[in-house]
Amino acid sequence: MKINKERLLEMLHDLKEFTDTPGNGVTRFSFGVQDATAREYILERAVEAGCSVDIDALQNIRIGLKTNSPDKDIVMAGSHIDTVRHGGWLDGIYGVCGALEVMLTLAEYADAALAGDKSVFSLDDLKANYEMVIFSEEEGSNFGSTMTGSKFVTGFYKEEDLGKLRDDKGKTLRQRLIELPVTDEEDEDSLDVYSMDYFDSGEILWDFNEIKTMLELHIEQGPVLDSEGLSIGIVDAIYGMRVIEVTLTGVGNHAGATPMGIRYDALCTAAECVLAAEEIVKSDEDERIVATIGKLSVFPDCSNVIPQEVKFTVEVRDKDEAKINEYMDSIIERIYNIASARRVGCVINEHSKSSPLYLTKSLRNDMEKLAKDKGLAYKVMDSGAVHDACMIANFVDTGMIFVPSIDGRSHVPEENTNEKDLITGVQFLLDVVLNEMKTEV
Ligand code: GLV
Ligand code: MN
Ligand code: MN
């Protein structure tokens, strides 16, 4: 069975236009106008192919391929459609378009079988049904916590977290969900792209007994496959992460009239902390652990006022949870010491975390065998980025497929992958899906 590569590329190119920052990367945060438009684009295609659509209160979307036997286990594929600010055109949405292309290919196949085409087998003879999923707020661009949608369906986040997660304007996730636009009832053609259901803890949790396999196709976002000239990565481990939020409070004052000797500058203190975090993780012999200070705000943010308050995040990632904690704890200690030496106030809050984990070994072996059979240039590798698959892997057999990122660039407008690799990845996803649908549970 072959995917329709023109359709795949067309969907990807169409969807990259749904951005708040045209000409400067893709900015499509969950629950914004561009998110709604992208949802509509995808749902229209799914509904046209006769698929069922289910949207939960967190706005995760599950789309089911039509089936005559709804009680069979589910083989699921998907990813996310939200992006970071000025991000790339493939992170997340490639896995969603891939899963959609697989669904459309299977739907066409089912139609041909129904119309009596003897050259195709009936999907009803397969041992599982197929579903695709779009998780909301994977990047954490609104609320600062990655994998938000998948954290709720797995129970990692609970109802009370709706009130704890806040966006930059101070609005809680609960408020943002309540304020989502309601579909225009007058317009008969309009689709419900958001659910208006009130959050119900019982309903949001997935029943993992009905899911056999979860697959996520994604760009690698690092340099390994591209530099080694390979077209497929089969993921073994996914790194964990821990994020803290630091608030430094100095004394704001006039930038011209205050001598250097009597300043309590929150930004100079932050600068020392940033370099200390870099130095601490760089001391690691494995050269694997990473620390990033990617978000920093200065108050009052005026060129002629000594910075009074600075807030910044520090995230540390590695494959070994003990190591993440050990290095983060020393960064925290250094930050307190630096602030205290400069007599600047310091408050540190834990913000979010996820544990490193290994994806399902048997599935990884099956995917490797399939890649070999298909003659693909592949390698088994780790993921430095987190993915919704991390949350789902705690419950069901989960696998991830990577395709190369040119020059290893991602989360930036330059993010790109060759067309040939994009097509190979989705064809491989279809092959793995079919393999899983044929396998007994
Ligand atoms: C998601 O893209 C992450 O790893 O931050
Ligand atoms: Mn992603
Ligand atoms: Mn990302």
Image (cartoon, rainbow, N blue to C red):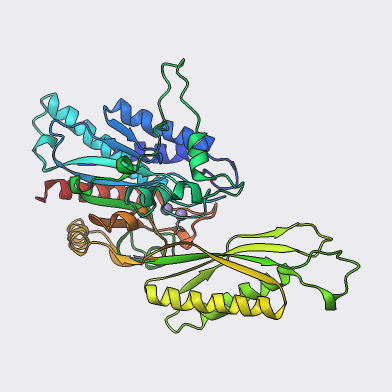
Residue sitting at the far front: 160
Residue 145 or residue 64, whichever sits in front: 145
> Residue shown at 52%/34% (left/top)?
179
Expressed as whole percent of the image width and height from the top left, the position of residue 240 reads 39, 66
Residue 110 or residue 52, whichever sits in front: 52
Residue 120 seen in the current view: no
Number of marks present in the image shown: 0
Question: Ligand 1 lies in which image quarter?
Answer: bottom left
Residue 202 seen in the current view: yes
> Residue shown at 63%/80% (left/top)?
337
Q: Is residue 6 left or right of residue 427?
A: right
Q: Is residue 179 left or right of residue 366?
A: right
Residue sitting at the far right: 257
> Residue shown at 73%/58% (left/top)?
299
Residue 116 sits in quarter: top left
353 up-or-down from 433: above or below: below
The N terminus sits in image quarter: top left
Q: Is residue 367 left or right of residue 25?
A: left
Expressed as whole percent of the image width and height from the top left, the position of residue 427 reads 27, 47
Expressed as whole percent of the image width and height from the top left, the position of residue 6 reads 35, 38
Expressed as whole percent of the image width and height from the top left, the position of residue 335 reads 61, 75
Residue 389 sits in quarter: bottom left
